[in-house]
């Protein structure tokens, strides 16, 4: 646990809570090694997360492309007036 605490600037109970949620969601597995709890990512479960996020990625790419085209048009119009 101390390896996770050092770079994150959060408390041990916060890390434990997040790891519990990830474990319950099936995104990480844990096993006890002596007194330590070792966590491992279960990458197979991340495909569902990726698929879900990909929908929003496409949506925002379309919106940001439209915004970029709008701003380019505004910039061209402003340059033609000057």
Image (cartoon, helix red, strand yellow):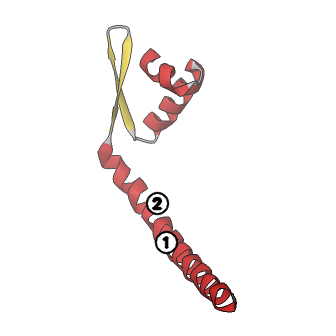
**Where the C terminus falls, by quadrant?**
bottom right
**Which structural element holds mark 2?**
helix
Q: Which residue is mark 2?
A: 53
**Looking at the picture, how far across and down is residue 54, in whole percent?**
43, 64
User: Which residue is at the far front?
Assistant: 82
Q: Residue at x 39, y 57 (%)?
A: 50
In front: 52, or 69? 69
Q: Residues within 10 Å of mark 2 (few under 14, many from 20)?
A: few
**Image depth: mark 1 or mark 2 in front:** 1
Q: Which residue is mark 1?
A: 61
Query: How much space separates mark 1 and mark 2, taking CA atoms?
Result: 12 Å
SS at circle 1: helix
Q: Badge 1: few (under 14), some or many (20 or more) residues near its Cα, within 10 Å?
A: few
Residue at 46%, 60% in the rendered image: 53
- Name which residue lies at 56% across and 28% down: 17
The image shows residue 81 at horizontal and vertical percentages of: 69, 91
Closer to the camera in the image, 67 or 15: 67
Q: Is residue 6 above or below residue 67?
A: above
Total numbered labels placed on residues in the image = 2
Does label 1 or label 2 sit earlier along the sequence?
2
Picture quarter with the N terminus? top left
Q: Nearer the viewer, residue 24 or 39?
A: 39
């Amino acid at each position: 646990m101390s390896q996770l605490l050092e770079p994150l600037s959060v408390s041990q109970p916060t890390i434990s809570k997040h790891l519990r949620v990830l474990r319950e969601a099936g995104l990480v597995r844990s096993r006890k090694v002596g007194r330590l709890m070792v966590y491992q990512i279960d990458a197979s479960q991340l495909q569902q997360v990726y698929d879900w996020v990909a929908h929003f990625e496409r949506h925002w790419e379309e919106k940001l492309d439209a915004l970029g085209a709008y701003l380019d048009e505004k910039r061209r119009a402003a340059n033609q007036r000057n």
